């Protein structure tokens, strides 16, 4: 699954201080190998160069009860 700018995602990276947090994709960059990496904006910072396999689509806020 690929993501686009403004998608809300959950980061899964045990080495990141944002592991398990939900953020918004602010930039999609393509590597020279044709893979996408992402810049994710969180409430208190951002992470750059995140590969797709470390991201999960966040549940829509409207779906949460």
Image (spheres, helix red, strand yellow):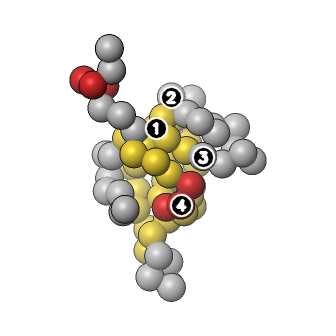
Q: Secondary structure at mark 3?
A: loop
* Residue 51 left/right relative to 17: left
Which residue is most to the top?
65
Q: Residue tagged by mark 4? A: 53
Foreground tag (3 vs 1): 3
Q: Residue tagged by mark 2? A: 43
4 or 1: tag closer to the N-terminus: 1
Q: CA distance from mark 1 to mark 2?
A: 7 Å
Q: Mark 4 Cα within 10 Å, few/some/many (few <14, many 20+)? A: few
Expressed as whole percent of the image width and height from the top left, the position of residue 7 reads: 33, 46
Q: Secondary structure at mark 2?
A: loop
Expressed as whole percent of the image width and height from the top left, the position of residue 40 reads: 48, 47
Q: Residue tagged by mark 1? A: 23
Q: Mark 1 Cα within 10 Å, few/some/many (few <14, many 20+)? A: many
3 or 4: tag closer to the N-terminus: 3
Residues 42 and 64: in front is 64
Q: CA distance from mark 2 to mark 4?
A: 22 Å
> Is 49 placed above or below 6 here?
below
2 or 4: tag closer to the N-terminus: 2
3 or 1: tag closer to the N-terminus: 3
* Residue 15 left/right relative to 59: right
Q: CA distance from mark 3 to mark 1?
A: 11 Å
**Which quadrant of the figure contains the N terminus?**
bottom left
């Amino acid at each position: 699954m690929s993501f686009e700018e403004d998608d809300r995602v959950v980061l899964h990276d045990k080495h990141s201080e944002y592991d398990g947090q939900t953020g918004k994709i602010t930039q999609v960059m393509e590597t020279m190998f044709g893979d996408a990496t992402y810049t994710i904006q969180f409430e208190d910072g951002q992470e750059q160069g995140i590969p797709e396999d470390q991201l999960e689509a966040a549940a829509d806020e409207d779906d949460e009860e």
